[in-house]
Amino acid sequence: MKYMIVDTPKGQYEIPLQLIAEHRADYYAVEVDGHEKGSPEYLAEVEYAMTDSYEAKDWILNNTDWKDWYSVAVKINEKINVTDADFFTSSENLSIIEK
């Protein structure tokens, strides 16, 4: 399973990449193109974000806020790599791992 690691001023958190990919597909495949959730087009959008790390990072940074993910994010450590001013502003503070 793939996860996006997010650096926050309160430590590092992980979010299942599948949730981010589905959030993106909800917009592009369902809202924009009018396809059904679960349709081949929807699944293609999910797969695209799952395999292209740029798309997933771009989506989470430029189309969502931390509050959209906090409830599903799991704190994995206390490592502080960003300040409040830098938080959720750069893809340098995001990484994708596979477990």
Image (spheres, helix red, strand yellow):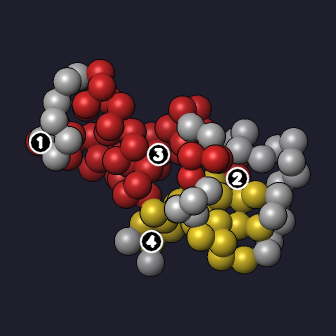
* In the rendered image, the vertical position of residue 79 relative to residue 62, given as above or below: below
From the viewer's perspective, is 79 left or right of 64?
A: right
Which badge, 2 or 1, comes first in the chain's sequence? 1
**Does dot 3 land on a helix, a strand or a loop?**
helix
Q: Is residue 5 above or below residue 75?
A: above
**In whole angstroms, how far apart are the C-alphas of marks 4 and 2?**
17 Å
| SS assignment at label 4 | strand
Q: Is residue 7 above or below residue 97?
A: above
- Which sits in the foreground, 5 or 92? 5
Residue that numbered label 3 is attached to: 56
Q: Secondary structure at mark 1?
A: helix
Indicate the quadrant containing the C terminus: top left, top right, bottom left or bottom right: bottom left
Would residue 70 be visible to someone looking at this image?
yes
State the residue position of label 1. Answer: 40
Residue topped by disc 2: 93
What residue is shown with label 4? 98
Q: Is residue 52 visible?
A: no
Q: Which one is earlier in the sequence, the residue at label 3 or at label 4?
A: 3
User: Image height check: is 31 above or below 68?
Assistant: above
Counting residues from the N terminus, which is met first, the one under dot 3 or under dot 2?
A: 3
What is the CA distance from the residue labelled 4 to the residue labelled 1? Answer: 25 Å
Which quadrant, please, contains the N terminus?
bottom left
Give the mark, 4 or 1, whose residue is nearer the N terminus: 1
